[in-house]
Image (tube, rainbow, N blue to C red):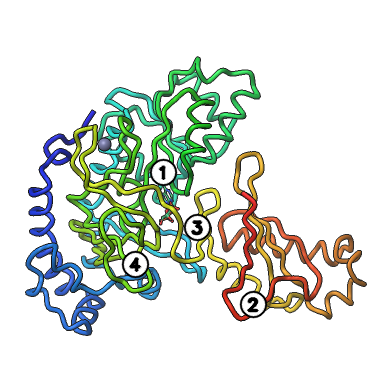
Amino acid sequence: MIWNEEIETMSRGDIEALQSERLVKLAAYVYDRVPFYKQAFDEAGVSPADVKSIDDVTKLPFTTKEQMRASYPFKMFAVPMNQVIRTHASSGTTGKPTVVGYTRNDIDVWAECVARCFGLSGAKPGDIFQNAYGYGLFTGGLGMHYGAELMGLNTIPVSGGNTARQMLLLQDFQTNIMACTPSYSLTLADALLGAGIDPADLPVRSFILGAEPWTDVMRAEIEQKLHADAVNIYGLSEIMGPGVSNECIEAKDGMHLMEDHFLCEIIDPETGNPVAEGEVGELVITTLTKEAIPLIRYRTKDLCSITTEKCVCGRTHARMSRILGRADDMLIIRGVNVFPSQIEATMLGMEELSPHYKLILSRKDRLDTLEIQPEVSEDFFRAVDGLDGLKNSPLAKGLQAEIEKQMKESLLVGAKVTLIAPGTAPRSEGGKIKRLEDQR
Ligand code: ADP
Ligand code: ZN
């Protein structure tokens, strides 16, 4: 079903007129209310009066994640704190998260966007929805939750993990729609098959999958194993959370953007210039209706393309491709963002280690697994008597356990640590250092 027929099937001309009207208001709103934007506009030599339509968006300055982080925790808020009714945060490179706030209207808009996503994914009022996105500071769980309730789904807030319980609910509650990460859907498929449960016997029709990159090859495997549709959902907490875009089940060919709320551009990440329609570049989003933390031209670092071509489903909102990569070195491990600089910061100051390390990403039991291989210092290597001691001595094991504990605390996702000998981690040979080995 199309949740909001009037908005989702508007003519392109009407969408763009609505976007222009909202952008004009937004420019004045952020200039008046957020000192950060007043300064950024002034520095760029642009005033709100220069913004007359969406064609003028390129005159406006970009906003980066680094700037958001520097405004920690509340400096970019455009409303008094007593109008903020929810705060979420996502993990960041320095250990300080990026904080996002929502007014009541922001929460309503978010729920509306997510309700559209459910429509796009083949859900209908009355369906039973098992929400296996994590509840908490991450936007995934609660973001999906409010949209599901708005549509009138029977929402089961089971949260992430605990595969045995997920399987029990799938069977006993007769779930129709489930949301989780794509990698987790395969873990679940294998667990079901391993327990002798045939997914074809379950009434679950659609899996709404996002928060991490995946491929059409994975989709084929998920759909075949789970006997259900697998649709892609995209979002990021800085902009809102899940529900910025979602594929339609009819075409499964690009994610329809909620264009009445988000003005999207694709730029060349090097030059900052717009690229031609259909070309791959960095997705840049301006929030057209957000009240608490409106963002101008936010650099998502996500690489994709956008098309405004007609879609078979009848919706007119533009579609973005799958995320094809990142313009920075962020890793996404089981839905959690991890930057190598975060790993570095955690290891820094441990005198047993050298500043060099290697990262190995692999896929075990369908789940992405991160292994960190920090190089120990010469002194430590001597203290454990060389390679054997590095593997087996209680001293080395203690250090390894300590690093694993600290990584878990700072990255919010577990990583295996294997100590390696001095001089064995990759060194830069002048160019960009390649610390990551991706075995997936
Ligand atoms: P989350 O809590 O879901 O991790 P974040 O805001 O921390 O949300 O992370 C958002 C990032 O996750 C995006 O910028 C993008 O890189 C990635 N992401 C989200 N959804 C998808 C998707 N469907 N495909 C690929 N990457 C995704
Ligand atoms: Zn469509």
Which x, y percent locates residue 57? 18, 67
Label 1, on which residue? 141
Label 4, on which residue? 268
Q: Is residue 379 above or below residue 361?
A: below
Secondary-structure class at tag 1: helix
For the N terminus, give its image quadrant.
top left
User: Mark 1: few, some, or many residues within 10 Å (few <14, many ≥20)?
Assistant: many
Q: Given the image, on which type of amino acid does mark 1 rest?
A: Gly
Q: Is residue 183 above or below residue 136?
A: above
Q: Is mark 3 within 8 Å of ligand 1?
A: yes
Q: Which mark is residue 428?
A: 2
Between disc 3 and disc 2, whose residue precedes? 3
In three-dimensional space, the C-alpha distance between marks 3 and 4, rounded to whole angstroms, equals 23 Å
Between disc 3 and disc 4, whose residue precedes? 4
Name the front one of labels 3 and 4.
4
Name the front one of labels 1 and 2.
2
Label 3, on which residue? 337
Asked if disc 1 and disc 4 are in contact, CB closer than 8 Å, the reply is no
Asked if disc 1 and disc 2 are in contact, CB closer than 8 Å, the reply is no
Between disc 1 and disc 4, whose residue precedes? 1
**Farthest top residue?**
201
